[in-house]
Amino acid sequence: NAGVTQTPKFQVLKTGQSMTLQCAQDMNHNSMYWYRQDPGMGLRLIYYSASEGTTDKGEVPNGYNVSRLNKREFSLRLESAAPSQTSVYFCASARPTSGGAIGSYEQYFGPGTRLTVT
Amino acid sequence: GQQLNQSPQSMFIQEGEDVSMNCTSSSIFNTWLWYKQDPGEGPVLLIALYKAGELTSNGRLTAQFGITRKDSFLNISASIPSDVGIYFCAGQTAGGTSYGKLTFGQGTILTVHP
C-alpha cells in the first residue's frame, strides 16, 4: 500500500503560469481533500470531495480548481499562479471510523508538494 | 468560522523530559485528532479521540478529549530526539454533511536537546 501519493514533490512557477497538482490514494477511501500549509497557520482546507463526482469549497478556495477524476484521484489546478500561492500543498484521504459518532473520519496525508511562485 | 488555538507555539526541552500541549476551540467538536509532522513530510496521525473525557495512549503519547468538547491535550513522556517535529491538533464536527473536514491548530514545534 502506497497510501496517498502526490506529484510533483517540488515546483517553481512564474506568476501567471498554470499547473496541476496530482494526488492518488490506494486505500479505497471515498473522501479526499486538498490543504495548503503556511508558516504559523497550520493547514487550511482548499477543496474537498466527499465522493467520486462531487467537490466542494473549503476555507480558502479562491484561485484554485479541483477535479475528482475517479475514486482514486483528486487533482488541484492553479489556473494563473500568484506569489500568494507559494505554499506547501497536501492531499489527504479519509475513511469513516468505527470508534466515533456517525460522520467521524480519520484523514491520512500525502508527502506534500512544495510550490514556489516567483 | 471555527477557531482552534494551540499552545505552546514552540518548546525546547531536554531529552527525557515530559511534554504537554493543548488545543482549545470556540466551538464543540465530536472528534479530536493529533498529528505529527516531520520536516519535509506530511502529517501522520498519532491518536484519535471520539468521546468527551476519553483518555487514549499510543506508546509514550497520551491524549485526552476535554469534558467540554472544546479542548484536547497531548502529553509525551520521557522525550527522545526522534520526537522532534511539529504537532498538530485537529477537530472535527461529525455529522452527515461534515464529510470528515478538519479544523487544524497552528502547530507546536518541538525541539529535543540530547
Image (cartoon, coloured by chain):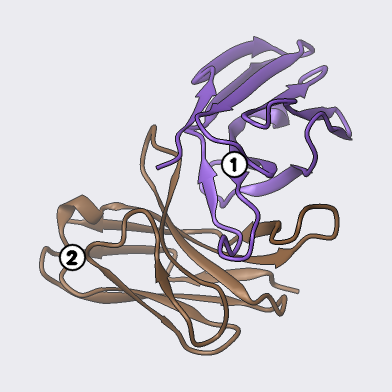
Chain colours: A brown, B purple
Of residue B64 and residue A14, the one placed in the foreground of this image is B64
Above or below, comparing residue B105 to residue A100 in the picture? above
Furthest residue toward left: A16
| Residue A1 at x, y percent in the picture | 76, 74
- Find residue A62 and report its image quarter: bottom left
Under tag 2, what secondary structure? loop
Q: Give the Cα separation between the discs numbered 2 and 1.
A: 29 Å
Above or below, comparing residue A95 to residue B76 in the picture? below
**Label ID, residue B29:** none
- Find residue B11 and report its image quarter: top right
Q: How many marks?
A: 2
| Residue B38 at x, y percent in the picture | 59, 41
Q: Are marks 2 and 1 in contact (CB under 8 Å)?
A: no
**Label ID, residue B90:** 1
Say which residue appears at 85% left-offset and 53% top-offset: A99
The answer to whether one can see residue A53 in this image is yes
The answer for which chain carries disc 1 is: B
Say which residue appears at 76% left-offset and 20% top-offset: B79
Say which residue appears at 80% left-offset and 39% top-offset: B51
Of residue B68 and residue A112, the one placed in the foreground of this image is B68
| Residue B63 at x, y percent in the picture | 78, 29
**Label ID, residue A81:** 2
In which quadrant of the rendered image does the C terminus of chain A lie? bottom left
Amino acid type, label 2: Ala
Amino acid type, label 1: Ala
Foreground label between 2 and 1: 1
Under tag 1, what secondary structure? strand
Marks 2 and 1 on same chain: no
The answer for which chain carries disc 2 is: A
Mark 1: give few (<14), some (14-19) or many (20+) Cα within 10 Å: many
Left or right of B34 on screen, residue B106: left
Left or right of B33 on screen, residue B104: left
